[in-house]
Amino acid sequence: MYTQKKQGIAECTYEEVPKKLWPVPLREIWGIGSRMEKHLNNMGMYTLGDVANSSLDRLRKRFGVIGEQLYYHAWGIDLSPPFIDARTFPQKSLSRPKLKKYK
């Protein structure tokens, strides 16, 4: 079942990927802008299904890590962490005099 979560996270089972994700036009995918869309179109790809059914090696050679990421996203696989724990990255504040230096 495909559901949209309030945090912007969607859930989709692997069985639903071809039906739910693959018909989506490339331009509607996060991270694919007009330039990337044009490059993919020139390679014969117009939907997320076209990316999924392309060669991972071909995408990796053309776009590097981004091509690999596109391929996995087309299959419904997102290897990025779902969130970052703010406690692992302590925040630092800047005093007013330090901020003035950068104006």
Image (tube, rainbow, N blue to C red):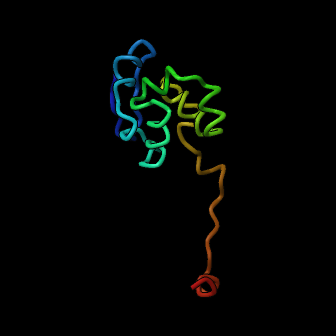
Placement of the C terminus among the 4 image quadrants: bottom right
Q: How many marks?
A: 0
Placement of the N terminus among the 4 image quadrants: top left
Q: What percent of the width, then of the height, locates residue 75?
A: 49, 22
Q: Is residue 97 above or below residue 69?
A: below
Residue at horizontal 65 percent and vertical 39 percent from the top: 64
Q: Is residue 26 left or right of residue 43?
A: left
Quadrant of res 4: top left
Q: What percent of the width, then of the height, locates residue 87?
A: 62, 50
Q: What percent of the width, then of the height, locates residue 100?
A: 59, 87
Quadrant of res 68: top right
- Residue closest to the eye, 58 or 89: 58
- Residue closest to the eye, 75 or 78: 75
Residue at horizontal 61 percent and vertical 40 percent from the top: 63
Q: Is residue 63 above or below residue 47?
A: below
Q: Is residue 34 above or below residue 47?
A: below
Residue at horizontal 42 percent and vertical 12 percent from the top: 15
Residue at horizontal 44 percent and vertical 43 percent from the top: 38
Q: Is residue 42 left or right of residue 93?
A: left
